Amino acid sequence: MMIVMSPQATPEQIDHVIARIQEEGFTPHRSDGKDHTVIGCVGHVNVDAVDPRQFELLPGVSQVVRISVPYKLSSRTFKPADTVIDAGRGVKIGGPEVVLMAGPCTIESRDQVEAIAPLVKAAGAKVMRGGAFKPRTSPYSFQGMGEEGLRFLHEAAARHGLLVVSEVMDRNQIGMMLEYVDILQVGARNMQNFDLLKELGRVDVPILLKRGLSATIEELLLAAEYICAGGNSQVILCERGIRTFERATRNTLDLTVLPLLREWTHLPVLVDPAHAAGIARIIPPLARAAIAAGADGVAVEVHLDPKAARSDPEQALLPGELASVVADARVLAAVTGRRLHARPGLEQTAEVVR
Amino acid sequence: MMIVMSPQATPEQIDHVIARIQEEGFTPHRSDGKDHTVIGCVGHVNVDAVDPRQFELLPGVSQVVRISVPYKLSSRTFKPADTVIDAGRGVKIGGPEVVLMAGPCTIESRDQVEAIAPLVKAAGAKVMRGGAFKPRTSPYSFQGMGEEGLRFLHEAAARHGLLVVSEVMDRNQIGMMLEYVDILQVGARNMQNFDLLKELGRVDVPILLKRGLSATIEELLLAAEYICAGGNSQVILCERGIRTFERATRNTLDLTVLPLLREWTHLPVLVDPAHAAGIARIIPPLARAAIAAGADGVAVEVHLDPKAARSDPEQALLPGELASVVADARVLAAVTGRRLHARPGLEQTAEVVR
Amino acid sequence: MMIVMSPQATPEQIDHVIARIQEEGFTPHRSDGKDHTVIGCVGHVNVDAVDPRQFELLPGVSQVVRISVPYKLSSRTFKPADTVIDAGRGVKIGGPEVVLMAGPCTIESRDQVEAIAPLVKAAGAKVMRGGAFKPRTSPYSFQGMGEEGLRFLHEAAARHGLLVVSEVMDRNQIGMMLEYVDILQVGARNMQNFDLLKELGRVDVPILLKRGLSATIEELLLAAEYICAGGNSQVILCERGIRTFERATRNTLDLTVLPLLREWTHLPVLVDPAHAAGIARIIPPLARAAIAAGADGVAVEVHLDPKAARSDPEQALLPGELASVVADARVLAAVTGRRLHARPGLEQTAEVVR
Amino acid sequence: MMIVMSPQATPEQIDHVIARIQEEGFTPHRSDGKDHTVIGCVGHVNVDAVDPRQFELLPGVSQVVRISVPYKLSSRTFKPADTVIDAGRGVKIGGPEVVLMAGPCTIESRDQVEAIAPLVKAAGAKVMRGGAFKPRTSPYSFQGMGEEGLRFLHEAAARHGLLVVSEVMDRNQIGMMLEYVDILQVGARNMQNFDLLKELGRVDVPILLKRGLSATIEELLLAAEYICAGGNSQVILCERGIRTFERATRNTLDLTVLPLLREWTHLPVLVDPAHAAGIARIIPPLARAAIAAGADGVAVEVHLDPKAARSDPEQALLPGELASVVADARVLAAVTGRRLHARPGLEQTAEVVR
């Protein structure tokens, strides 16, 4: 932390700031410039316990500059090597393989998930997704099938050797969900539901943590820090689009931060392009771009008949479109030094129709 | 709902869309333009049960235009008269009086709230605020005193005839909090915590609902709709700043939407300028502007010694600054046809020092 | 400028950075912290000639922190006293009086401006506005009357003792425009048209500089700096709304920065609420809020028959609405220690109809 | 255009709207719903001459919905086939080949461009870039070499059979620049400098039009429309990052709109990742992502010694990094059915050091 005094600061004000720094347990390093005196604060045993903003209020202070990043356990400095998360059944996220997660946006019936599961498997996905609790903007929209849906999803996935990921919306649901799912997902709207994050820190399954609509990547890492600080370091970060002024797309997929996240954190990063695009036909190019930018995996929605889906129908791929994404992804993963295990020949057999 | 066909749509595609509209229970009204055929959908008994986006997927459809607003109980159309919420002890929010809420950001000790309560009362505030559960971006920041803090706040406020408002972060806290608070606050990060909102719909106290950092006002009204739909129509909306590209201020206070909210909804609207400003000395002009723009009330943070506060110290007013805000607010309220009951002469006796 | 080394920086890298700092003419001040070494750069004769970002590329550097603000002539540090601009006919902008500018968005005919001028005068405005060159998003929209329109505007304003402000879009227009206008306006889209700004630095009339749709206030001050650095320090800053995710209003009027601008710069600040609102009926509350937040003036659009206007008809006030704004503004100005010279009784005689 | 009446609209108001629609030359189509009456406006000969917003002001109108897109010549509807721009020397932009543009951000000396030109050529680039007029946020930053720089760039490029692209900042520069450059670039800050755009409509060289920092893609297409409407349809659109709340990167590269632009317009689309990234080491993954998302070309900055560059040094690749981008781009282009002509073996010979 460095404290920059204003050009008008008096000697008394500078002395007062130095005294306060010492009271807080820092050793001050003073440096007098042409316009500004700068006071560095070094040597504190526990810098997190000190709120740098309190110094902004002292008379004569112009700005306080934070030097350390506010997250720790999730930082590359703390753990230089990539975290590879073993999600079960040999599925490793963050390693050399680009992991594909696919499935319906919302679980609608046993027939639906049973029909989709073999297609998800055939496409090369390792994890099947499907929502049982849906965070819907309107109270009048379909809110999900709940536990019954999770049971259908679990059974269908198990039949094909797939793992299951599904969204948890409230900490009271965690215990029940662990019977059915292998990865718990935190939705964008809950990224800063700190009570939920704390509870997930006490659980021993991977957490797929989606970036909030207006969360900076520093805030995303601080949300991950809540989980890690609780004792669960199996956090998979997920970029899914941020809110900007552009209205042509629902959200703006922020692939720009992907290479930065690679530097800042050891945690794996997935990309979910569906909600950014909001339109199924632009999902395949975005999935390709995500892999080219270095994503550890991609999550897509797939549907037998998107037009009849009960939520976000316009964001789901048809099975043939999924196959095409997978075929391209194999090549793209190779460019970035990764690999993607898709069943050879899928793309030839699947019909690409919309 | 109106469905706009693309210029390339075939007669078969148009017929197919019309058939689907009829299947969903609408009566189609076709209108053929130079480039576009437009099909109006009228007469449905329950328009909310139909997801307009499913029509976007039909071949030949260019866009689907929603006509009705998606919220109901919170709309002016549903209830033309202003909602005036009686929060207890004769305090009415949304009526002719501009209501002032004040108190510390975070409850830190019994001494702190006991010292602040008489100043809050003297300034003319009717409601005392103070956080016992704090949503902190970093897991290493102070997380609040919990129930003990609420008891201190409740006792100090009661001693001066003030109501109490405090933030609820999780639905498991509601029952306990009702013993201490008169108004339950939903923080910006929880605006779309739908499980919490549903639970608050079953409670019989006013809810102060803060706008999310990247929530549109339509989404704010839909969040209010969750509470109203559950049976609790005592919702006070609160503008507290949105996230924009501007970095000089922490958030951008969006007073632009205030007159629009007045038209769209019958619910009262408060403004909390502290988090937008992020700097105490610019809070007074923003509080003045909020009242001039027609806010039903203003919530501010006040502190005896902001420099020693354990959270957001830079956002708290000193008692003298609060008095100055109140003095101006009285005049401003008059301009907008409102009034503010402040104790005459307060501004003369309080020392305005910083 | 301070250079923060990364925790992994080697002693050689630190020495190299120090050597480069000295080459650039700075005296380095080294301070070794627990994780980071920080090197302060002091004593340079001309800090502007050095691009701090070049140091970001040196091996081992984590971040470079700029300490001085990048603008000078427009800063409070450079000139502590408020700049009061004498625009002619005794009109002073930035002084104790809140200045009102009013007129049509676009000059449409001699009759139009002749009819509006007396109303503008009667309302208490000192400056008449009207666009002759219009920056229109679509090439197919009306592009303005050009010089002929300026002549009409000038004649109508002169007849009532009003000053004239109009937008200049290209530096080739400046010479001609100076025959007709007293204040040259730079539109939001041209805020960073640096060739235009440089040319305006050589002119001896006040410049009304509108903030760009996505410009930070630091960028606005740097744009002003272009004009000041050219020799013309008569710059009036103008907040007119920024682009955010909110879609209910055209732009978000950023009154949050008003009190900050007051601290950072000595230049006067106007507010133009029309383009933020995009809807005439929400302009009056925003105009009131702007004055309450401390604006030095307000610019509004007025029209005899907004429904027939050729550009932005939905943003123009009717004469009666203007009178109501003026009446309120008089009171609000008093609250902020200002005054507004409106003709007494105007609000009684004008019809407020829409 | 469709006009939606409010639920409270009276029969007289509906009749009045219908009468106004007819006055404007439309044929009204009325459709009465449960809550809303909707009036479609069809059959107008010249819809662009009518401002739909004028109808928003009529009593009883709730909203006006535009159906047609406001741009024409640049739309796919107007011209279904891709536009392939022949820039000279056989370089075709928008065809099967992914075009690479490379060069220094700013022309600094004859030696500099002469040294870079052979590297640009060897990497497989077809166009050499370099700025002679620089739009700098601060008036105290280096503003470019002007015409002398263009002459150096032109000579160096010609020696290696490369085309030249450079930014034009003012319409007075166009004539002079045409002696030296093959493609005129419009910078992001000038995207809505309409006088400049109009002038470029009268020129017969390709225009590289960069998207403004806060411009929607509809506004980008309308800016292109200004050039096309003037008679020059050789417009190359360029995505270069938009301004969002995220502060970790300078801008957010909006690859999400790429597949949409492909649908909306026949014009080619380039991506310039340098200004979004703001950090050289994250440019290669973004360049890869851009090609994977379907860009017709990529523009990158390259520098022999970025640390000594006079503007934006942190955004320039070293020659070896450029070679690595090119190697990957060849494979990625193949995935999207394109090709990139790079000289084989370059990546082996170039040293990748930083």
Image: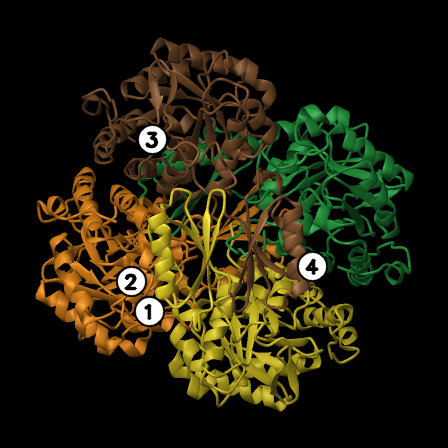
Chain colours: A green, B brown, C orange, D yellow
Q: Which residue is mark 4?
A: A281
Secondary structure at numbered mark 4: helix
| Label 1 and label 3 in one chain | no
Quadrant of the rendered image containing residue C305: bottom left
What residue is rendered at 39% in x and 68% in y? D25
| Residue B155 rendering spot, x and y as whole percentages | 42, 10
Which residue is identified by label 3? B296
Q: Is residue A159 left or right of residue A353?
A: right
Q: Position of residue D225 (x, y in %)?
A: 48, 74
Of residues B309 and A104, which is closer to you in this image?
A: A104
Image quadrant occupied by the C terminus of chain A: bottom right
- Circle number at residue A321: none
Q: Residues within 10 Å of mark 2 (few under 14, many from 20)?
A: few
Q: Amino acid at mark 2?
A: Ala
Say which amino acid is labelled 4: Arg
Which subunit holds the residue at mark 4? A
How far is the residue under mark 4 from the one under mark 1?
Answer: 38 Å
Secondary element at tag 2? helix
Please tell me in which quadrant of the rendered image residue B63 appears: bottom right
**Label 2: which residue?**
C308
Q: Amino acid at mark 1?
A: Lys
Q: Which residue is mark 1?
A: C134
* Relative image position of residue B156 (x, y in whole percent): 39, 12
At 47% across and 51% down in the image, what residue appears?
B245
* Total residue callouts: 4
